[in-house]
Every structure is written in C-alpha cells, then in structure tokens.
Image (spheres, coloured by chain):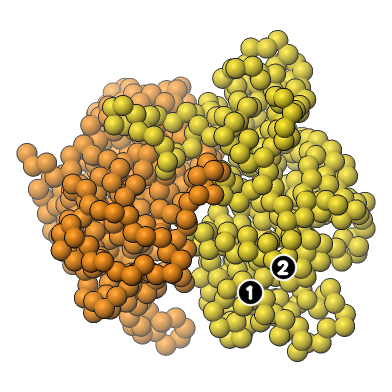
Amino acid sequence: MSDVLVSARGLEVHFPVRSGGLRRGNAGVLRAVDGVDLDIHRGETLGLVGESGCGKSTLGNALLRLVPPTAGVVTFDGTDVTSLDRRGLRTMRRRAGMVFQDPFASLDPRRTVAQTVAEPLEVHGLHGGRQQRAARVGELLELVGLDPSVAGRYPHEFSGGQRQRVGIARALAGEPDFLVCDEAIASLDVSVQAQVLNLLRRLQRQLGLTLLFISHDLSAVRHLSDRIAVMYLGRIVEIGPAAAVGTEPQMPYTQALLSAVPVPHPALERQRRRIVLRGDVPSPSAVPSGCRFRTRCPYAFEPCPTVDPALQPVGADGQLAACHLHGVVGTPVVSETPEGAPARPAD
Amino acid sequence: MNVLEVDDLRVRLRTPRGTAHVVNGLSYTVGPGETVAVVGESGSGKSVSVLALLGLLPPGVATVSGRALLQGEDLLAMDQERLRRVRGPGAGMVFQDPMTSLNPVLTVGKQIVEGLLAHDDDLSKQAARRRAADLLAEVGLPDPERALDRYPHELSGGMRQRVVIAIALSNSPALLIADEATTALDVTVQAQIIDLVEKLQADHGTGVIWITHDLGVVAGIADRVLVMYGGRCVEDGTVDDVLERPTHPYTRGLLGSLPDLAAPVGPDGEIPDLMTVPGLPPPPTDLPAGCVFWPRCPVRGDARCETEQPPLVQLGGGGLPHRAATWCTHE
C-alpha cells in the first residue's frame, strides 16, 4: 500500500470566461487551478492556505472531481479519478467526504438531522435496515459530540457550531479515508471555532483520517496541520512541514502572508515587521508571465518575468518553494534587500 | 478633552420574542488619537452599541438611554437634523462589507462629493471633486482622477474599503468608527487597510473605535480594549493588560480558544488542544440574573455568581486602569 492516498499531477481547472451582455463570446480563460502537483499522505493533515480567488476551493473540489479538471491526473488510492465512470465515482466518493463552509446553506432545512446524516448511508447502501441505520446515525452524532437524541430535530433549531457538527457527521457517514474541509470554521465565532478545530483533530486521530484542511486562516491551519501548502493564483508556491512553513517560510509570498497575520500579543505585534504587499492579486484570467508572484514581489529580479519557477527543495527537510531566489538547492541567490523590506530569513 | 464619553449606554430592542437587552450599561471614553477596540462574539452587542450612538437604529424598535458626549455634545439628546449634521464632521463610520455600504449605481466620485457637499454649503462642485480626488489619493487608490468615475463593482474589495474610508474621513471627523472593517478582507489587504488607518489617525489625531472579533488585529492597533459579553463590558484596560494579563474568565476563554501562529509547541512536538468555552452566549431576551457569563463559566463557584451582578472594578494595585466584572478575581 502506497504512502500516498491522494495525488495530483499537472492538475488544471480552467474556466471559459464569457463576456456578458447581449453579444456573448469567449473573452478568455480563468485559470483557477493552473498546474498543481500534490501528494497527500495517508493519515496526515494537509493545510491548504491562500487568499480569496487563489483556487484553493477549486483544487479541493477537483480532487474529488466535484469540478472536472481540464488537464492533469488525480489519483485516489492508486485509481485515476479523472477517468472514473459513474459507479466508480460513487465508490470513490464514499471514501472521500466533504465539509463545507456555510452550515446554514449546506444542510437541507426540511430534513431532520437523522435524515441528513443517513442520506449517504442510503446512497451507498450501508447499514441496511431502519434500525441499523438509526443506530449508526446515533453513533455518528455521538462521534461529533452531539446528543443522539437530537436526531429528530431540524437545522434551524441548532447553532452554527452544532450545524457544522451535523455536517461533519454526514461527511463521516460513509466511513471515508479522506476528508476535505473547505473553510469549515470560517463562519463560526472564535470560541466555537476552537470547539470544531479540537473535534477535527480528535476525529483525525481516532479514525486515522487523511485530512485536507482548506482555509484562509493561517493560525488555524498552523494549529491543525502536519504539512502546509500555500497557493497563489492557481499554483502551489510553497509546501512543507507545518513548523518549517509556519516559522521559516522560503517563498516571499508566504513570508508576506505570515507577516500579515496578526497575533494576539501586543508586545510581539509592536516588534513584528509587517511586509505590506503592493497592489492586489492579479486576475486569474490574466496571470503574469514567468513567476506569477513577481508583480507584487519585493525581490523580483532578472529571471522572474521570463522563467516560471518550479517547486524545488529549500530550507527544512521536505520543504519546497517555487522561487528563483533559491537558484541552486540550499544556496539562495543573494539579492539586494529592497528598502523597507526585512531581510530574508537565513536558510 | 475626550473625543467621546459614553456613560451608562443602554439599548433595548423590541423583538417578537420579547424585549432584547442588547446593551446594558456601557461606559467608556475615547481620547484624541486613541484607538479603543471593542471585542466580543456575535450577539455581544458591540455593533448595536455604536449604531445607537449615531442614531442609526430604527426608532420604533430601539430604546436608547444614557449619555454619549461627542466633543462635549450629547449625541443621544440630539434631534435628527442636528445628528445628521454631526455624523460627517463629528464621526465617520466604516462598515464591514464595502459592497453593501457603497451605492452600486453611483460612481465613487459622486458618493464622496455627496458627503462633502452635504456638510459644506460654500463648496463648489469642482472644488468638491478636487477634494474627492485628493481623498482617494490619500487612502492610496492608484490613479485617483480616473477612480472617481468608476463604479464600486469595478474595484477590488480592498480598494472598495479604501473608498469607504475616504468617505468616512471626507469631513475630517474627530471620531472614526470601524465596525469589523477588515473582516471581509484577505490578511494581506487587511494589513494594508490597518496601515492606512494608523497613518491617517496619526496625521489627523482622530479617535478610533475599532469593533472586531479578531484579537490579533486588536493586539496590533489598539491602545485600550473593551471586552463585551451579553451587552456588558466584562473587562477593559490597556491592550497589554487585557491580552497578556486577562482576568475575566470569558476573556481568558476567548484568548485560549484562539489558534496562535506564535503558539509554543509542546514537548511531544505537538501544539496542545485549544481551550474552549462550552455552551453558547445567552439570548439577549433572556439574560441570566447574576453574572452574565455564569452559565458558561469554568470557575464559577462564588455564591454570588448566580444571583448578583458583579460590578466592573479596578484590579490589582492601581497603575493603569484595568477593570473586570467578575466575582472570581482570585487565582
């Protein structure tokens, strides 16, 4: 059995952009995911971070084939997901669950908790018989920290955090190996976020789940993940062990992103030098040539506009970054530190 | 003189489920150039408390009492006309979602000029337009002249929020109220906006009320912090005191439940589990009789918790004001 559960090679999801109005026509291509190579190892939690529009949700969806990739291959436990027929897809999706952002929109308001959680069991023909199913629903609710007696209630009777627990129970119903959590805590209050984060960590350990935790919240990702992948404009620009990426990022974008995350310590905040990036993220339908981060990068130099950097080993063991500053492995090209920008951390 | 002095602010809202006691006796001050952060979770009353100050709550539904002196004049005693006059030059407001606080069918320029002309009868249209362009330049919009003729949907989220800030600052208010102003933005854009507000504040000496649930943001920008729970202030003090030496069990819970980028890794190489506050905040229609946090409090035990409301009292041996409303100040 391979150590890799989910893998993507050269994955692309491009959407045609149509101009609006009466005369419709193709106005270009939106490169939501634009060449991603990724291995997710069995039993690990991989955090996927990036800002809005970077393609992180589309990548998560493409791994489960909830959106069809336009190029590249996704394999799930050795099987090519991109070429599966309906039946194969159904089997695959039993083994892969998804928890969505908005627990208000992702639960059917007219179904009871029991009906919602039991649906995957019916679809996949698991735990046949009403009593067995009811028992399984009770088990699942207990697993996510809800009282089984709430099974007959409707979503509106629950708070946001409780609804998210129902969503997690539903995702776990098919006993998946792989769970994708797409901004699963983003709409929750701080104290409730903590409850759900703790729950996810407990479940991951208890059930040996492989978890893809997609979030814009770097602190939460750092808290939960074994490894962190950073996405920018449809591409993974840095990936590595959470501690390494979280404390010694090697890609200028990751450095800026981390420096912008406020930490709740006033003394530390006063000392920290925030790297404030210029401008906005370019549109994914007009990706810059060469390195896609170069238009905002404080270190951009000669090769950046022409050569698209590949992910290559940098810094700590298992850490990869796509940046020309790392010309040869372990020996970064020395560049002049631009005015006002902090020195790059030593490798 | 303080820019704002709020004294015993109370807001009740009529709801189908009965009277909601949303703000219950809030008192605080904001000095010139000072940033006061109001923190709390959804339903803690933080937004309503500032909407009430500016008379932005529906009059048939809300009952507001107390006193709120903006540069010496009581906002709560003003008639609508006076209040409208005061809102621009006295207090500017920046809301969470820049898309909904801008008018989608008016150009950015029109919306800024509108605010300028409303508060200055002598200003010509041309002069107002020039001033609008200056404002956009000041908040860092590239090519401000052209930006004046753009519609909100043509701008990114960060740029839109800059426009909202330009409008809020257009009459050089003494007080700027930012209600979750960076919550909808990405962290790198949030950093840009925070930098901008800090710079403008330093230039103009504006007092700022920054409402947020993000304690990280608070650590970076606030001079003083006020923690709200159940419509009450449960703890306030300097940002260092409240965040580094939190005393109220709720403040402690809130800080403990925050995943922290700077969190130390445990001996097993793992980050320990987060602390959580069990349960949910009480509905404002049905607040507990004693301490408002009592039903969720992990250290409750004092006989008074259930029956008697703890007053907001100064902690420790003097120094800078640091107050908490709890019966459990003992370690």
Q: For mark 1, what is the residue?
A: B138
* CB-based contact (under 8 Å), mark 1 and mark 2: yes
Q: For mark 2, what is the residue?
A: B169
Q: Does B40 sit left or right of A80 as displayed?
A: right
Where residue B327 sits, quadrant-wise, is top right
Give x and y (percent) for residue A112.
45, 35
Q: Residue at 79% x, 61% y: name it.
A: B174
Give x and y (percent) for residue B180.
61, 53
Q: Residue at 23% x, 31% y: name it.
A: A208
How crowded pointer 1 is (Cα within 10 Å; few <14, some 14-19, many 20+) is rated as: some
Which residue in the rendered view is the most extreme toward the left?
Answer: A1
Chain A is which colour?
Answer: orange
Q: Residue at 68% x, 61% y: name it.
A: B201
Q: Is residue A126 above or below residue B143?
A: above
Q: Does A307 sit left or right of B29 as displayed?
A: left
Is B57 in front, or is A173?
B57
Q: Is there any visible trace of residue A105 in the rendered image?
A: no
Where residue B143 sits, quadrant-wise, is bottom right
Q: Are marks 1 and 2 on the same chain?
A: yes
Where residue B312 sits, quadrant-wise, is top right
Is A250 in front, or is A132?
A250
Give x and y (percent) for residue A207.
25, 29
Chain B is which colour?
Answer: yellow
**Disc 2 chain ID:** B
